[in-house]
Image: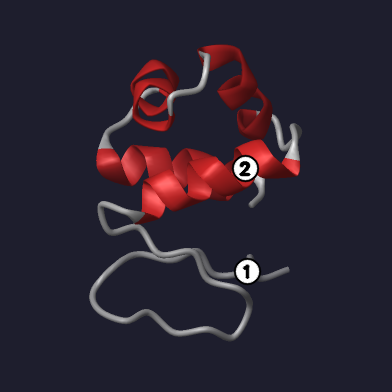
Amino acid sequence: MNAERFKAAKAFLGLTNPQLAEMTGLHGNPLNKPDQGEGKAATAQLARLTLEAPGNQFFEDGKVAAGPGVAMKEAQA
């Protein structure tokens, strides 16, 4: 999960890092790393699962949503 997707998923749910930290049981500092595109894979996976539980969907290239939502398209050059 890159930084833009992480930030967008939090924004879709109206969550701040402290709120997400409470939901995951993590201290807030590890959740600052994904905002910068960094951090441990296990932290990113826990954050992703936590953000998916209320309805966020993360897509790999070519995947289609299973319902209404918002997705980013690659910028046109």
How packed is label 2: few (under 14 Cα within 10 Å), some, or many (20 or more)?
many
Residue at image location 76% in from the left, 33% down from the top: 38
Whether pointer 1 and pointer 2 mark residues with C-beta atoms closer than 8 Å, the reply is no
Mark 1–mark 2 Cα distance, whole angstroms, equals 22 Å
Residue at image location 53% in from the left, 84% down from the top: 63
Does 1 sit above or below residue 72? above
Does 57 sit above or below residue 20? below
Marking on residue 55: none
Corner quadrant of residue 55: bottom left
Residue at image location 25% in from the left, 79% down from the top: 67
Front one among 33 and 24: 24
The first of marks 1 and 2 along the sequence is: 2
- The x and y percentages for residue 44 are 62, 42
Front one among 67 and 23: 23
Side of 70 where 48 appears, left or right: right
Give the residue type at disc 1: Glu
Number of on-image labels = 2
How packed is label 1: few (under 14 Cα within 10 Å), some, or many (20 or more)?
few
Residue on which the image places disc 2? 44
Name the mark nearer the viewer: 1 or 2. Answer: 2
- The x and y percentages for residue 61 are 63, 78
Residue on which the image places disc 1? 74
Does 25 sit above or below residue 29? below
Give the residue type at disc 2: Ala
Residue at image location 64% in from the left, 52% down from the top: 1
Quadrant holding the C terminus: bottom right
Front one among 28 and 64: 28
SS assignment at label 1: loop
Residue placed furthest toward the front? 25
- The x and y percentages for residue 9 are 42, 47
Side of 35 where 12 appears, left or right: left
